[in-house]
Every structure is written in structure tokens, then in C-alpha cells.
Image: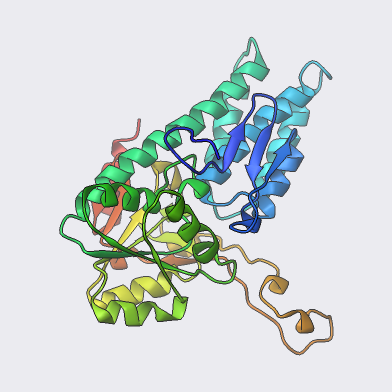
């Protein structure tokens, strides 16, 4: 792939009239982009996990609204109502990622104004959201790397790199920045059931010539016991006002294990991932996906006695988190009080 914004990997490519989405379900075996020209297609791309990762979902949604305006403006006098319908459709694509709703709120605020050229202005907003996410990732990468001085090994979960963001990455961005400064052993959990770690994270790091060791999710405790890692570094799909964090299923268990073994736990996410309307993690909606994503094919029938529980996320309580890294700064040992400093700094 061609390099853009100094990044090897591009999950989203905006052409000005369409959105190209790297189908992450087919990585690393096949690298293919699907092209979408309307909000319905972008909604499907998000719902089917062609595009995934909270920041990338928000960016894709913003482009989806831009495509909706392009599709309906000048075609019908009711174009605003049509766009509103598409925004509602996009909002239903993934319930947990707060960045999705933040991005849609940005587009709604702009649409509420008197616009001279709605097509150009909505496109410009989506491009701005995309560019600002990349800039935020680079800032978070440097701030997080500051915390890793003296560390010899880290582990990450799921995929939090350029594939999950506008570019560079959140947790993986920290690892990228840190490996430029110091020698660091990097471990990645496979992340069942979709294997984002095995399929995406190790592939993405290899694209940037960063050595990485893959391990089974169930081997994480023994890795911590070995003393080979100092930090667990993860991203987030939604952070409550007190610092409780929803992230890919398996994150909570890693945090509990980290506490037991004296390993520090870092969450890296832009401030758009913080949902200030939610007091704590008990109020975060956890997406449940189809049980057939988890069940062997032989049990995929209506009269089967075997079923599956398939939550996509879990919630890590703030007391298990050593640091939350945002583009606005770092919150050590997050609480409702310490999180407020980040909120007060957001204009």
C-alpha cells in the first residue's frame, strides 16, 4: 500500500465522492477495499465489522453523513429529512462506541446551521474529524511513551492501531512511539473470538517492522507471572465519567490479572471516547453479537441444546487502571475527581 500521513496502514480512504474501507475481516490473507457511495453502505460496513475500532467507526460515520448529503442535496427539497434518516441509521450500527455518536452529533450541529455549500462543508467536517484523530493519536503516543521509560516489555489486546483509528493508533500508537525511543518487547493477545490481535495487530506491527510475539489469550497470566512485561496497554470504546472503561471482551480479565501480578494497566483513547453523561461503567451498554459468530457450525440450528454468550465488550473499573492517556493529558489512577481535570480542559 502507499504510505499516507507517514502510516503504512490506512483503514479508511476518502476520495471526495466515496469512502473506501479496508475489509478487516479478510486480513491478513487478503487486502481489499470496499467502496461505498451512500450512508447505507457505510452503516453496513460498520455493523459487519469491515471497519472497527471506536475512533475509526466515528470517522466512517462522519463520512457516511457527507455521502448522504452528496446523495440527497439538490435532488430533493426534502434532503435534510433524508439525511436525518441516514444519521439515525448510522447511529444503530454499533451501540457501544461513543465516538460514533460524537461524530454524528458534530454533523448534526453543522447541518443545523445555514450552509452555503452543504456537500463541501460536510465533506470538510469529516476530513477535519479524520485529521484531528490522527494528530490526537500522535500526541497520545508520545504522552504514553513517557510513562514507559524503563519498561522492558508490554502487552496489548485487540487492535488499537491505524486500522482502528484515523491513523497511527491509540494503544498501538503508544507502542509505536515507545519502540522508537527504547528497546521494548511487545506481546499481543490473539483476542477471541474475532482474533483481532492475531489477524490485525501483529500484521500491522510487522508492516512497520516492529517485532511482536503473539500469545493465546489464556497464556496472559503466565506471561505476567514470568516478569516479562511491565504494562498492559489497551484502547477503549467508551469511558465513563469516573474512568470505568469499556473495551474489547477480555480486557477486564487482563486488568484483574495485572493487579495480581504487579503489572501496570494503561488505557489510551481520545477525549471523544469519554462519555461524560455516564457516571460509571454500570450504565455502559454492552453489545451482544450473534451467537453463531462463536458456535461451531454443527450447533447452528434452532433445536440445538448448545447456545453461546457473545458479549463484544466488558468494563474495567477505574481502580484497576494506572493511567488513562488522552490527547489532552494523562490521568493517573483515574477517579471521578481526577477525570474532571480532563473535562475542564476541553473547550
Q: Is residue 27 left or right of residue 268?
A: right
Q: In front: 196, or 304?
A: 196
User: Looking at the rendering, which quadrant does residue 312 occupy?
Assistant: bottom right
Q: How many tags in the picture? A: 0
Residue 289 location (% of width, % of height):
66, 66
Quarter of the image with the C terminus in it: top left
Report if residue 158 is visible in the image.
yes
Q: Is residue 204 above or below residue 248?
A: above
Name the residue rendered at 65%, 24% in the picture: 16
Name the residue rendered at 20%, 61% in the picture: 151
- Colour mapping used in the image: rainbow
Q: In front: 175, or 37?
A: 175
Quarter of the image with the N terminus in it: top right
Q: Is residue 173 above or below residue 261?
A: above
Report if residue 330 is visible in the image.
no
Q: Is residue 260 above or below residue 165?
A: below
Residue 47 location (% of width, % of height):
68, 53
Residue 78 location (% of width, % of height):
81, 22
Q: Is residue 142 left or right of residue 347?
A: left
Residue at the top extreme, as displayed: 116
Residue 235 location (% of width, % of height):
42, 55
Q: Is residue 84 above or below residue 283?
A: above
Amino acid at each position: 500500500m502507499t504510505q499516507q500521513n507517514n502510516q503504512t496502514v490506512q483503514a479508511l480512504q476518502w476520495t471526495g465522492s466515496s469512502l473506501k474501507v479496508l475489509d478487516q475481516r479478510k486480513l491478513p490473507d487478503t487486502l481489499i477495499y470496499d467502496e461505498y457511495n451512500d450512508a447505507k453502505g457505510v452503516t453496513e460496513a460498520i455493523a459487519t465489522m469491515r471497519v472497527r475500532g471506536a475512533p475509526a467507526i466515528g470517522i466512517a460515520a462522519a463520512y457516511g453523513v457527507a455521502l448522504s448529503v452528496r446523495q440527497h442535496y439538490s435532488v430533493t427539497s426534502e434532503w435534510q429529512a433524508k439525511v436525518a434518516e441516514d444519521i439515525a441509521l448510522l447511529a444503530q450500527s454499533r451501540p457501544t462506541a461513543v465516538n460514533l455518536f460524537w461524530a454524528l452529533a458534530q454533523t448534526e450541529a453543522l447541518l443545523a446551521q445555514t450552509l452555503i455549500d452543504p456537500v463541501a462543508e460536510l465533506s470538510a467536517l469529516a476530513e477535519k474529524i479524520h485529521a484531528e484523530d490522527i494528530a490526537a493519536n500522535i500526541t497520545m503516543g508520545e504522552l504514553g511513551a513517557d510513562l514507559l521509560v524503563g519498561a522492558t516489555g508490554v502487552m496489548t489486546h485487540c487492535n488499537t492501531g491505524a486500522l482502528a483509528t484515523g491513523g497511527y493508533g491509540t494503544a498501538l500508537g503508544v507502542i509505536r512511539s515507545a519502540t522508537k525511543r527504547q528497546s521494548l518487547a511487545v506481546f499481543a493477545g490473539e483476542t477471541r473470538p474475532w482474533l483481532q490481535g492475531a489477524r490485525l495487530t501483529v500484521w500491522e506491527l510487522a508492516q512497520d517492522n516492529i517485532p511482536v510475539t503473539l500469545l493465546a489469550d489464556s497464556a496472559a497470566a503466565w506471561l505476567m507471572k514470568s516478569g516479562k512485561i511491565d504494562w498492559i496497554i489497551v484502547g477503549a470504546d467508551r469511558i465513563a465519567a469516573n474512568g470505568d472503561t469499556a473495551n474489547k471482551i477480555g480486557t477486564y480479565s487482563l486488568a484483574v490479572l495485572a493487579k495480581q501480578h504487579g503489572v501496570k494497566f494503561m488505557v489510551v483513547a481520545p477525549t471523544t471516547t469519554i462519555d461524560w453523561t455516564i457516571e460509571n461503567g454500570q450504565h455502559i451498554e454492552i453489545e451482544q453479537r450473534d451467537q453463531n459468530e462463536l458456535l461451531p457450525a454443527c450447533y447452528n440450528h434452532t433445536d440445538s441444546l448448545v447456545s453461546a454468550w457473545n458479549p463484544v465488550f466488558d468494563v474495567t473499573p477505574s481502580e484497576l487502571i494506572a493511567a488513562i492517556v488522552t490527547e489532552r493529558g494523562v490521568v493517573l489512577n483515574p477517579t471521578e475527581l481526577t477525570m474532571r481535570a480532563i473535562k475542564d480542559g476541553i473547550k
